[in-house]
Amino acid sequence: MKSDSGLSSVQESLLPKRPKYMTISLLNLIDFISYMSLVISTLFLPPENVDRVPVPVFFRGRLSLYFIILGSFGFSLWGSLIGSLMELEHKCMTRVERFFRIIAVASTEVVGDGVVSTPMFVAGEQYNVTLEGISVGDTYVPFNSSGKVSKGNILIDSGSTLFALPPDFYNRLEVEVKKRISIEPMKNDTLLRNRLCYRTEITNDNGPILTVHFEGADVELKPMQTFNQPVRGYDIYCFAIINHAKTELADLGDQGLYGNYVQANFLIGFDLETRMVSFKPTDCTKL
């Protein structure tokens, strides 16, 4: 099915989401003016008692209008509250890893069994760590072919979904991942923008375990964290780690980006005093 933009629904769902800007309709404008009149008259003009009910002077002789606007305001406030609660439930239930990540960012100290920590480099509002390489099973793939890495070469981004890597590192990593999956990947699908995808779900039974080697900290990722279903309603399962070349993230250059898909089932603490990031494997469904 084609949309008004000329892209198919599948293609649009794979493109980065654009920000949604507020639009104001005539009804919104009328409501706004009515509410502001109510607020201003209530706060700044002395009320009068009408049938023992304090009514702003502005609505003297317009008692019915006052109660209509007051009731409308109450319903709108209640609707906004319910809508916010539903939106929160939606995010927590359908994108559970986002909920986990929000909890993690709010916590500066993560302790207990299995916690690993790596030095953090803070630049403004950015939090970078050093990625030395990734193991696919027992095969180690270094960040650079030379084995040397720059400090703070990957950004932990709470607002991005995918794990993005420079092309040289990604290409070597993808080769090893393909070796560990006996299923034939999809080929030459332009809608998927040449991502590594399969028509069979990649699980712990048929997919590899990846170990992300940060400086001083090894973080194990299972297939549920490294493969996702990017298009609802389609049996397509794609590698959640991407080559950022020729994408909107190309300006990262030689750096990487650690998105929230791979943060699922981890508590992650950012300690600004010690400049450390800590990772703790957690069954977040039990939180």
Image: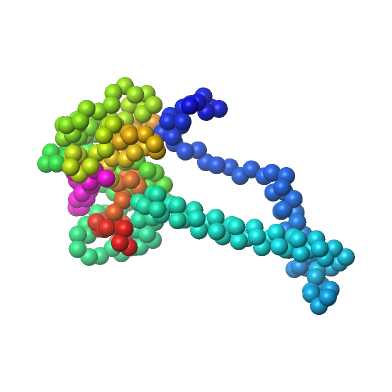
Which residue is farthest top? 188
The answer to whether residue 277 is seen in the rendering is: no
Determine the image quadrant of residue 75.
bottom right
Query: Which image quarter holds the C terminus?
Result: bottom left
Does 237 sit left or right of 12 as displayed? left
Is the residue 117 above or below the residue 175 in the image? Answer: below
Determine the image quadrant of residue 76.
bottom right
Determine the image quadrant of residue 15.
top left
- The residue under the point 55% across, 59% down is 82
Q: Position of residue 30 (x, y in %)?
A: 74, 50
Verify whether residue 227 appears in magenta: no
The answer to whether residue 71 is seen in the rendering is: yes
Q: Position of residue 170 (x, y in %)?
A: 26, 33
Verify whether residue 219 appears in magenta: yes
Q: Position of residue 242 (x, y in %)?
A: 31, 35
Does 224 sit left or right of 105 as displayed? left
Does 241 sit left or right of 20 as displayed? left
Which residue is farthest right? 61
Magenta region, residue range: 209-224
- The residue under the point 22% across, 38% down is 143
- The residue under the point 80% across, 68% down is 56
Which residue is farthest left? 138
- The residue under the point 39% across, 36% down is 233
